[in-house]
Image (cartoon, rainbow, N blue to C red):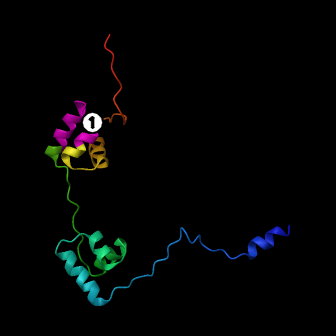
Amino acid sequence: MEILPGIIARPIRPNCATATLRRQRRLTRSEVDNLVDLYATGIDVRQLAAAFGINRDTALRHLQRRDVPSRASIRKLTDELLASATWRYLAGEPMTKLCDDLGINPTTLRRELTKTGIQLRRPGRPSARRDK
């Protein structure tokens, strides 16, 4: 059992090829003020985080600490569009085409159709029907 002490004694080093260390970036008060002002103009949090060199969650925490109200998530699929998409889906139109036409993510359409009780088709190509 002399192998075990040799393994334990070795220092554990991260694989330099895969480990990327990033220096933590702290914003000054004036930078946080600027972040808040830019957010108020309508700039997206992801864009702000990239511009300031910080993580998106960090940017959100700065805004929360300043009691900045978060923007409401805007529903892209209105009731009218959902009704139209439902009829088109039930008529056999592919979900990918519907999503492209409506400019929405397939996950959004799946979620909305499931909420309305529509049973979703299996993904992939429709099987060929043979009428006898």
Taking the view exactly as shown, the residue that stands out farthest to the front is 17
**Label tally:** 1
Amino acid tagged 1: Pro
- What residue is at 26 percent from the left and 79 percent from the top? 67
Is residue 96 highlighted in magenta? yes
Q: Position of residue 119 (x, y in %)?
A: 32, 35
Q: Main structural element of the magenta stretch: helix, strand or loop?
A: helix
Q: Position of residue 31 (x, y in %)?
A: 28, 86
Mark 1 sits on what residue? 94
Quarter of the image with the C terminus in it? top left
Q: Position of residue 80 (x, y in %)?
A: 13, 44
Q: Which residues are magenta?
A: 82-98
Quarter of the image with the N terminus in it? bottom right
Near-viewer residue (30 or 114):
30
- What residue is at 30 percent from the left and 41 percent from the top? 114
Instruction: Tell me where residue 68 sits by quadrant.
Output: bottom left
Instruction: Tell me where residue 39 sits by quadrant.
Output: bottom left
- What residue is at 53 percent from the left and 67 percent from the top? 18
In the rendered image, the vertical position of residue 76 relative to residue 89, given as above or below: below
Q: Is residue 34 left or right of residue 80?
A: right
